[in-house]
Image (cartoon, rainbow, N blue to C red):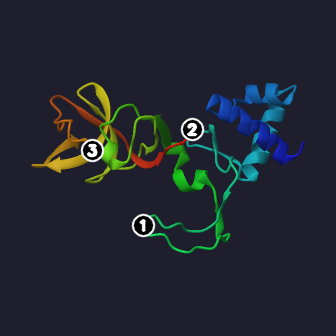
Amino acid sequence: MEIEEAVQKIRSFFQSQKRLPSYQEICHLFGFASKQSSFRLAKKLIENGILKKDDKGRLVPNKLFSALPLAGVIAAGMPTEVSEQLLDSLSFDDYLVKRPASSYLLRVSGDSMDEAGIHDGDLVVVEKERKPREGDVVVAFIDNEFTLKYFRIKDKRVVLVAANKKYPVLYPRDSLTIFGTVVAVVRKYH
């Protein structure tokens, strides 16, 4: 079996299921008679840098998706003359997710972070082991509810601040746990 054929099947599974297949599912996907064949294929994909194992030994994407060509720079201010040139190629896996084993995605619901450029329906990439700094956007569990807000220190207390003036500053009454720091926002148009 060609590596690229295997990558295509694993990629299709990942896109439809939003996760990698288990070893048993790899058996079904490729028509293997035993899990041993699944382990060998996974090992080959790890050796080729396509997949890797997280700290718990689970398979996670490494370079599962192809790099796209980085064709140049575009002015977002005054228009400038730019000729298209291939600068490099860029993998979104590498660009958006520096620590896949400690990262996860969340879909945003609501408008409290609009002024930070995080809108309803966007996906945020969250690193759960990254310690938040003043001004970071965090996933917080405050008084038994989850929210996405700016992490701020006010009068030596942690407070959560929306990026929309119609929402109040949140002061924890009983408890506050930070579940991760937002490191990227993904928005799909169309």
The residue that appears at 68% across and 56% down in the rendered structure is 67
Q: Which mark is residue 56?
A: 2
Task: Give percent across and percent down for residue 1.
Answer: 90, 42
Say what secondary structure mark 2 lies in: loop
In the displayed structure image, the side of residue 155 where residue 45 appears, left or right:
right
Marks 2 and 3, the one that precedes in the sequence: 2
Q: Which mark is residue 163?
A: 3
What is the CA distance from the residue labelled 3 to the residue labelled 1? 24 Å
What is the CA distance from the residue labelled 1 to the residue labelled 2? 46 Å
Image quadrant assignment for residue 126:
top left
Q: Are marks 1 and 2 in contact (CB under 8 Å)?
A: no
Q: Circle 1 is placed at which residue position?
A: 77
The residue type indicated by label 2 comes to: Lys
Q: Along the line of sight, which residue is nearer the eye, 135 or 28?
A: 135
Q: Along the line of sight, which residue is nearer the eye, 5 or 131?
A: 5
The residue type indicated by label 1 comes to: Gly
Task: Give percent across and percent down for residue 114.
Answer: 33, 43
Question: Considering the image in quadrants, where does the C terminus appear?
Answer: top right
The residue that appears at 27% across and 44% down in the rendered structure is 163
Q: How many residues crowd around disc 3 within 10 Å: few (fewer than 14), some, or many (20 or more)?
A: some
The residue type indicated by label 3 comes to: Ala
